[in-house]
Amino acid sequence: MFFRLVADSFSRRLTRKLVTAAALALGMAVATAALSVALDVGDRLAREFRSLGANLLVRPVADSLPLEIGGVDYRPANAGAYLPEADLGKLKMIFWRNNIMGFAPVLEVPAKAMSHDRDDELGLASNRSVWPTIPLIGTWANHSVRLADGAVFETGTGRTNPWWQLMYGRWFAEGAAECVVGKNLARKAGSYVGGRFLRGLPIGDNLVVYRGDSEPPLFLKAVGILDSGGPEDDAVIIPLSIAQQLAGKPGQYRRLYVSALTKPEDDFGRRDPATLSPQEYDRWFCTPYISSIALQIRQALPGTDVSVIRRVAEGEGKILTRVRNLLWLVTLAALLAAGMAVGASSAATVLERRIEIGLMKALGASSGRVGALLAAEQLLLACFGGAAGYALGILLARFLGEMVFGAAPGPSVHVFVVVLGLAAVVTLGGSAVSLLRAARFRPAPILRGE
Amino acid sequence: MFWRILRRLLFAHRARLTLVLLALGAGAAVTAALLNLETDAEHRLTTEFRSFGANILITPRNTTAPALSAATLDESVYERLAAQQEAERSRSSALLYVIAEARAPASPEWVPLVIAGHKGDPLIAAEFATLESSPGHGTNCISGTKVAAQLGVRAGDPLLLRNRPVEQTCRISSVIRSGGQEDNQIFVPLDTAQRLASLPQRVSLILAGYYGAPEALQKHIADLAQRIPEADVRGIRQFTEAEAKLYTKIRSLLLATVALILLLTGLCVLAAMAGVAMERERDVGTMKALGGPFSRVLRLFLAEAALLGLLGGAIGGAAGIALSIWLGKTVFGVAAQPRLIVYPVAIGLTVLVAIAGAFPLRRLAGVRPGEILRGVS
């Protein structure tokens, strides 16, 4: 009898039920879309933030003070400590290896250099010691690191300095006698470097690097022009192996930039690992906080000092947390609005059925039974409306994700459960007041139409 | 008569009135809150982005990296910038780099390092974590953590600086860590660095932080380049580019989410309103039986809906703006500026939705009074 009544109610007032279900489905679609996007946005944005480049800097621990201005180290090549390049594969062996998005070692060599044809014209060949000093930055442009497990990891400045753009030409080949020239140095008219005039270095020309009187000069062919918007515009980027050869430090580097995907530090992440209990330490170690990744890199590369580039990491953490909170609040607002509108709609369905309720009570139905009947109807509506809303919401979330990040958030079971539960709570909650009122209805006046 | 019926329609059924107001008010509140947050987002985001520090670099023209060349800018360039920065939503600071030496008074050994003279807004300090500090009088300097470790000094200690033949002393007011080159530098007041370098009234570079959307930033950079012809003005690509990218992403994400939620909230309220309207068959039937022409009956109901929309919008909109102020405070720490334009827009939208929600009543044109009054449905 109970089920017949419910089924009857659905078949007889189908339009009315459809309208309520539509309101419910739309509300739940908002909830689903907002929840899916909010759950996914942290990871997506964290990836976007990697366009800021490296957030960790690795240096030798026993180093003298670098004379570094604007990212260029002015120490002579023989001062300070170095690190072995061969160890770098270990970076992809740490616990959070998949969060290491890229790394690039750097070895700077200030060298006296001159563009090739100018050398002959000015007759400077005889006195190379008056050539201008140009910072030569040795690094990886596109480098394949062979890992211990046989895999190959592609990395280079593209990962650590994604804002570096080649205006013309291409990157140098690994180990070739080629170079990429900063755009200021490459200017056609040339420029003054260290008080000396250096003629522009267009693509195809050779940079002659002075290596002392006893050795023949090194010729590096310019193959590209770099626009970095930073101090590198006044420098020449060369393959790391060439820099090592010039500095007489084979297989070594001075600085390593690492770009890692991290979770913004919360209060727990900021605590000193030394003060954590063993369980807390495990939790800290197994969370991709930038500090725990820094610690793991220090353990993997002995003799290094790993510092967090605060300018990048702090800003990223702050903005990420804020944007995430903002989206959660928007989601909350969406849930609230959907809940209220749906609640109002289901309250209306109960309200309009006063006569029916009066009739049932007059025929001897108890208030509890009438309530159960109405609640069952509402729950059935919640199931259908919620499921339809979920499907619609997933489509919307996909659309949003594709549009903004070019990648759709995957459907999540959690969201489905939450949305169905929410639909049930909202419809029941919305009709609760009306149901309570219905329980107090006195059949006679209602049937009389008062 | 029209108004009397309208009043009765509205207030005869208090439960229904509450329901409709709840649905409309909730919709209006969310609309107002989201619109307010959205209009405020540009300001918020660009302010947040400045936790990256400077995004504009001003250097002397035709020069390479500052330490290697003697080219510097006149300090007046900085003064000119600083005088206008209030109006331009930007901040700036001037720096002069000197490669010099330093030592603790107790140690005989001079250590070569980079000394940075600094003046202006503590823009660059946005990136620092202060490890220890000991404020005091005299010439204060800030030491990078690596420098402090190398020289064996702490906050509060005196420090000797030398760039032959000039010698200066200062007192370390704090030790900072940035993770970047600042860890290897000592920050001193600009005039101290100018004396050390024997370059009075000169600076190596000027850093500026501009608060604005990416296009506005590019315009500002072009504007500065025109105003300071003697210098090379450029955006710090690492940050300008990432900011532009992130700004677009976050804005479009927010915009899309808000648009979606508004649309669906509207539809949701619409469906709820339609549901409420459909139960009015009896009222329509009675009115028609009493001889009211249908157009007049419809007008009555539309007027009711509009009034409800106005009321719901007014209450909900106000609640929504209050909500967004509170939200702004929780998320960004600063209350969102209430934008007055949001309020009428929210009310207007709610009225529209309410009237649209009453439209299924048109269906009742075909209602035959007799049937309704007899209770046949």
Image: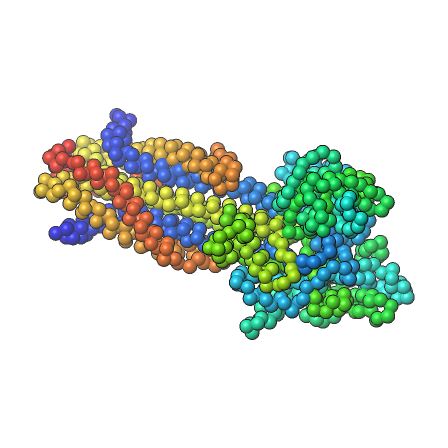
| Residue drawn where x is 61% and y is 42% of the image | B211
- Front residue of B153/B58: it is B153
- Give the x, y percent position of residue A201: 78, 62
The figure's colour scheme reads rainbow
Q: Quadrant of the C terminus of chain A?
A: top left
| Residue drawn where x is 25% and y is 42% of the image | A431
- Front residue of B8/B302: it is B8
**Is residue A408 shown above or below B265?**
below
- Give the x, y percent position of residue B254: 48, 47
Badge count: 0
Residue A74 visible (yes or no): yes
| Residue drawn where x is 33% and y is 39% of the image | B23
| Residue drawn where x is 27% and y is 53% of the image | A383
Decide if residue B234 is on the left or right side of residue A344.
right
**Is residue B280 shown above or below A416?**
above
- Give the x, y percent position of residue A263: 51, 53
Decide if residue A82 is on the left or right side of residue A215.
left
- Give the x, y percent position of residue A404: 49, 54
Residue B226 visible (yes or no): no
Furthest-front residue in view? B106
Furthest-bottom residue in view? A150
